[in-house]
Image (cartoon, rainbow, N blue to C red):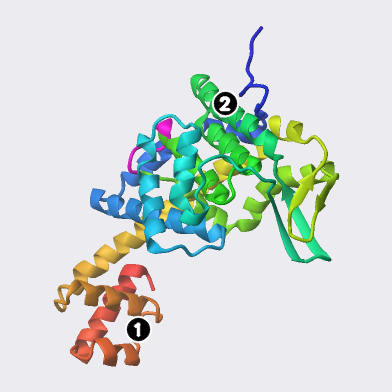
Amino acid sequence: MYDNLLGPANFCPMVRRTPEMIHYVERDFPQEIEQLLGDYDGELITKAMNYLYTKETLSSYQIERERPQKGRLARFTSLLARAYRLPKIDKQMLIDIQNVIVDLRFAATEYRSFQNYIGEILDHERQLIHYISPRTRDVAPLMEGLLTSIERMLQAHVHPVIIGAAISFGLVFIHPFEDGNGRLHRFLIHAILARTSYTPPGYIFPVSAVMLRQSSLYDAALESFSVPLMELITDYNLDANGQLSVYQETAHHYRAIDYTHMATYLFSCIEQTIERDFHEELDFLAAYSQAREKLSTVVSLPDAKADLLIHCIRHNQGRLADRKRQRHFAMLSDAEISKLEAIVKEAFGQ
């Protein structure tokens, strides 16, 4: 008998071969990137990728409405850059990564030992629960199945984006930690795409930027599971201290989720990173490089001054504001200012 299941009994994701899914699977996104990058200078590409790593980090935290200290941002960015070198994804690795991305006071040493949920509690009479995660005793078996399914799908050569969607969304639905589940969910997308060489070393699809930009679509992907689930979990109580107790069996609801919507959504995010984010960043850097080069033919400015000048002109509709000029560029003549404004406007098509 042919077994084409994507995981074991305790976590077995499903993905349907819809026309849209087949269309995405047949597209060669890595090849499209290679063709796109062939039109740009190597140094420019390196700068763009460095920025996209930072953009992905910032976006992932902004989705959670967090503004962490620069140290944590730097550690997460470094983690993304090293994703292709990470060993087999296992429990200890997940704990280690969670420790990197959260405040140290919420760093885990084990899967959660309490019932968690997503909701809003304004007072005892105003409670709104959006999502209930698996009960504490069900977390370890579900996570064991999730980790087993990674290797099973890799060995079966399942499409990397499908693996990334099933595993990353599966983890956020299980919610195995007190904090950091969302960022860990989005990190796993990159870890799996890097491990399968779907994204080569040094490259990244900034999918969190797309999720942040179109948050309603990201919410819809999450709610494609959470909304139907909440119709099935009815026997629970939330006490005055915000402690949730679930009295019915729920583990089976999380074991065999249909991830078709999530996989299709992730494909669409990658599509947008290529068709918009890569283009925008590379075109911006090309314009910036052109402006910097031509500015130097008019006047020799320190790098910081040249960057500030371009920024001020770009963000004032192609003109250097009088206040900015008096404060930062009083040394420049009217004729020089006119030439510099014209250079910046031409470079950025203003």
Identify which residue is drawn at 33% across, 43% down: 202
Residue 201 within the segment the image draws in magenta: yes
> Could you say where residue 280 lies in the image, as x and y percent from the top left?
41, 58
Q: Residues within 10 Å of mark 1 (few under 14, many from 20)?
A: some
> Could you say where residue 239 lies in the image, as x and y percent from the top left?
79, 56
Instruction: Identify the residue under disc 2.
Output: 149
Q: Give the residues drawn in magenta, as a range.
A: 195-202
User: Overall secondary structure of the magenta stretch?
Assistant: loop
Q: Secondary structure at mark 2?
A: helix
- Closer to us: 178 or 8: 178
> Could you say where residue 180 lies in the image, as x and y percent from the top left?
54, 50
Instruction: Identify the residue under disc 1.
Output: 319
The answer to whether residue 327 is left or right of residue 192 is left
- Closer to us: 24 or 350: 24
Quadrant of the frame with the N terminus? top right
Identify which residue is drawn at 72% across, 42% down: 225
Cα separation, mark 1 vs mark 2, equals 57 Å
Quadrant of the frame with the C terminus? bottom left
The answer to whether residue 309 is left or right of residue 228 is left
Farthest top residue?
1
Residue 274 visible from this viewpoint: no
Residue 124 visible from this viewpoint: yes
Compared with 336, 211 (above or below) is: above
Q: Could you tell me the amino acid type at mark 2?
A: Ser
- Closer to us: 315 or 146: 146
Q: Give the image quarter of residue 308.
A: bottom left
Q: Could you tell me the amino acid type at mark 1?
A: Arg
Identify which residue is drawn at 33% across, 53% down: 50
The answer to whether residue 23 is left or right of residue 105 is right
Q: Give the image quarter of residue 251.
A: top right
